[in-house]
Image (tube, helix red, strand yellow):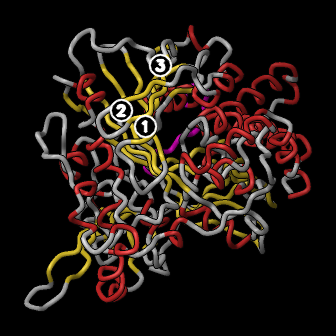
Amino acid sequence: MDAIQREEMEVDVVIVGGGSAGLSAAIRLQQMVNEHNEKNPDDAIEPMIVVLEKAAEVGAHSLSGAVMNPSALVELFPNYKEMDCPILCEVGKEAVYYLGEDYKIKSPIIPPPFKNHGNVIVSLAQMNRWLGAQAEAMGIHVFAGFPAVECLYDGNKVIGVRTGDRGLDKDGNPKENFEPGMIIKAKTTIFADGTRSPLFKHVSKRLGLRKGKNPEVFELGVKEIIQLPKGRIEAGTVMHTLGFPLKKGVGGTFIYGLPNDQVVVGLCVYLDTMDPLLDAHRELQQLKTHPFMKELLEGGEVIAYGGKTLPAGGWFSMPKLYHDGMLVCGDAASMVDVKKLKGVHLAMKSGILAAETVFAAMQKDDFSEESLKEYQSKVENSFIKTDLWATRNFHQTISKGVFMSAPEIMIQEATGGRGLFDHLPIAHTDAEATQPVVDVWGPNGLADSANKLPEPDNKLFFDKLSSVYMTGTMHDEDSPNHLKLQNGSICEETCYPKYKSPCNHFCPANVYEMIDKDGEEGKKLQINYTNCIHCQTCDIKCPFNNIDWTLPEGGGGPSYQLM
């Protein structure tokens, strides 16, 4: 394999990731090029802009709530409403509830983080498909099914990426359809490859981009789209709940009314919980057993499911955003306002600012660190900082628990995000927070009713495997396992006895199972990697950091259509 002959391509800009951040960067850069050429026909430029997307088609791996602040979209396309942009509806009615075991309490006011008037409800999968179509119509090269698996360097200068090989069997040997990955050399590389990006994770470590920063921490979100009987919910209705069903973790739910009598029901949980039995999919199923939800969902049928992680560390967990030959934006740069559960507009804005920085570098023909550092200044003078600065200490506080943290959260709200103390540290990573089952649940943790899945009816309640079917996930079964287990004996001898194998619970796609050994006592870990929906929770939450999520063959993974 070391002697593989790889095709090389020279481009001006390569953008890793065809999501909201990457596509916005590509579109804005091409817009600026077009504006320049129109004003300077004798000095026209034609830079080659390439977007690499690991999914089989743009949007297939895109999942979010998504109530979207349209500010960045307006900046990119002021006339988006006349361009058939797939806005589902505008936010109308709003409500916030606390759910007890069998009751609800409605908040008399809408707390500031939950105010959504002026925002729109979208399917991020559809929105990114639309952005991809706009990019291609402008002449931008969008290559779907081509994950960037390796960063190329000249010393410590980033000079491009290599895409993954295709057509390898389970053992990593070339099959008849083998296609070697391509070397793409670029003057600038923009990393926009999402949460816990396996490529940018290595880049940031090599270049020390997170030195002096708070550790990254994450949330896991799962959601379903449910078809309801006619007239059950008004499109544009937005509801949030706290409390039930979460007992040992911190999080909340979102409920969005869509056109055509559909509703989004989703749940987000912080991954720095002590609970080794955390199971977001199970909690989502339990949520639907609450009397409040029963009344809303009666007669409904789940038609789509998905899950993903989102960065929760905020401003103090953001990496250095530039280096010699590269920029980073969107979720890969921890740009999510977790208090408001908003990140799409921040991703798009960061892509726009990255494009402006790269265009200025083109004008000077200077893509050095000194030239690209202007991007950091642009971010700090935009609403990205305004939004994230106001929530800079939120995660560190809310992790104590909703009620314990309430007074400090109120002080933060009154002091612009500062609170009693500023620049609060993050004490541990999500993996380090995990505690033994007996310490959290007592000796019968798995038997506790809170850890039981409601009886599936394959209409409104589902087991994990049935839910995964609704994601459209596909991987070639005769391809290498992209989930790299470092030491299986840890799973058998330490993790299962002490923690009851958290990966069996936190994975929202039934990828990990402890099964009986053949003809021997004890259990072993089975990895059903073809179920993987690319949430990367295993890379984040394994208490021994024993799983490395790597990029699978291009085109594999979920195929979200409605999400």
Q: Position of residue 434 (x, y in %)?
A: 46, 70
**Can residue 137 be found in the magenta stretch?**
yes
Residue depicted at 49% across the width and 58% down the height: 271
Tell me where residue 73 sits by quadrant: top right
Q: Nearer the viewer, mark 2 or mark 3?
A: 2
Instruction: Count residues near mark 1 (Cα–Cα under 10 Å), then give few for <14, some for 14-19, many for 20+.
Output: many
Q: Amino acid at mark 2?
A: Val
Tell me where residue 447 sits by quadrant: bottom left
Q: Which residue is mark 1?
A: 253
Q: Which residue is mark 2?
A: 265
Q: Which residue is mark 3?
A: 86
Highlighted magenta segment, given as a residue range? 136-145
Please name whichever residue, 140 or 256, is drawn nearer the observer in this view of the structure.
Answer: 256
Q: Position of residue 50 (x, y in %)?
A: 61, 44
**Can residue 503 be found in the magenta stretch?**
no
On screen, 49 above or below 239?
below
On screen, 292 above or below 413?
above
